[in-house]
Image (spheres, rainbow, N blue to C red):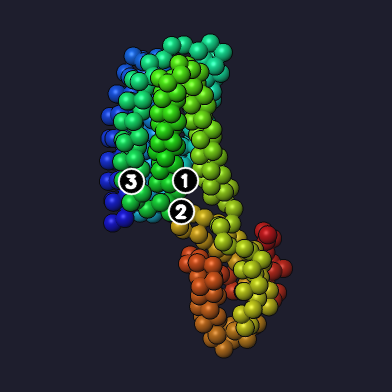
Amino acid sequence: MAADADARYLTVALLLIIGFMVVEVVAAALSGSLALLADAGHMLTDAAALGASLWAARLAARPAAGVWTYGFKRAEILSAAGNGVTLLLVAALVSFESVRRLVHPPGVQGLFVVIVALVGVAVNLTAAWVLAKANRSSLNVEGSFRHILTDLYGFVATVIAGIVIVATGFARADAIASLVVVVLMVKAAYGLLKASGLVLLEAAPEGVDLVEVRGHLLGTEHVTDVHDLHAWTVTSSLPALSAHVIVDESCFLDGHAPRLLDQLQACVAGHFDVEHSTFQLEAAGHLDHEAGAH
């Protein structure tokens, strides 16, 4: 199963990140490098993100039951939102310390920083390669992948900062590299929070223009009006749509209604890639009895 494969990829990446994070905390303490400590803090959020993603993937695989009519498929969206929030929190902490060190730069062992950061590049490249094989259409997996990719960029910046310190003795390069990591964190966090927010706030899925949907439905023979048209995303790659469709009364008399329903569902599946759709076929006068129509 794809879900089992994703869980394996997430587990491998998690073990890689935790192992190197421990090494990096020790290296940051020995070298006095804030950039390494910032990366270690980011890797802590990576580990938390991967752990949450792994947990969410397991939850999402559970079947629907009882009050959970969609199962726990939205768990991955909550995980992605959590990833975005943790990125912002770490970015705020690192920003504060970076500014302080720009004003009062401490001594940093540049060569040590370069060596550790190069190992970090290799570890994160491996983790990114592993996660790239997972299903990245899942916002849950994509959130973890962005964590790893951002950390990879951060290590590259740290390598550059270490080289500058070795070559010129410019200690502030370490704090500047940390601020570069902060910018990348904020960018990744914005993308995750925007994508997860659209799902949680029931926005129409990307590529589903309700004006176009309405036009396609009204273009179907025997359809005279459409109201209460809604489209949302249950979870990644699972868009849904519902509508009340007013049709000619003859459809209820000549047995044409089932064929019309097939046409409507085929329409939204073929034009908008929405396979989970629900249509309520109505006679013209039924709307007068719908107090809760939207």
The numbered mark at residue 129 is 3
Label 3: which secondary element: helix
At label 3, counting other C-alpha atoms closer than 10 Å, the crowd grade (few under 14, some 14-19, many 20 or more) is some
Relative to 147, residue 37 above or below: above
State the residue at coordinates (53%, 10%): 104
Whether residue 25 is visible here, answered yes or no, is no
At label 2, counting other C-alpha atoms closer than 10 Å, the crowd grade (few under 14, some 14-19, many 20 or more) is many
Q: Which residue in the rendered view is the most extreme toward the front?
A: 167
Dot 2 amino acid type: Ser
State the residue at coordinates (51%, 82%): 259
The quarter of the displayed image where residue 216 is located: bottom right
Q: What is the x, y in percent for residue 1? A: 28, 56
| Viewer-closest of 272 and 130 | 130
The quarter of the displayed image where residue 247 is located: bottom right
State the residue at coordinates (41%, 15%): 108
| Viewer-closest of 3 and 40 | 40
Q: Which residue in the rendered view is the most extreme toward the bottom?
A: 254
- Location of mark 1 (residue): 77
Mark 2 touches mark 3? (CB < 8 Å)? no
Label 1: which secondary element: helix
Q: Earlier in the sequence, mark 1 or mark 2?
A: 1
The quarter of the displayed image where residue 223 is located: bottom right
Mark 1 touches mark 2? (CB < 8 Å)? yes
| Viewer-closest of 193 and 233 | 193
State the residue at coordinates (28%, 51%): 4
- Location of mark 2 (residue): 236
Relative to 209, residue 174 above or below: above
Q: What is the x, y in percent for residue 272? A: 54, 67
Q: CA distance from mark 3 to mark 1?
A: 23 Å
Whether residue 112 is visible here, answered yes or no, is yes
Dot 3 amino acid type: Trp
Label 2: which secondary element: loop
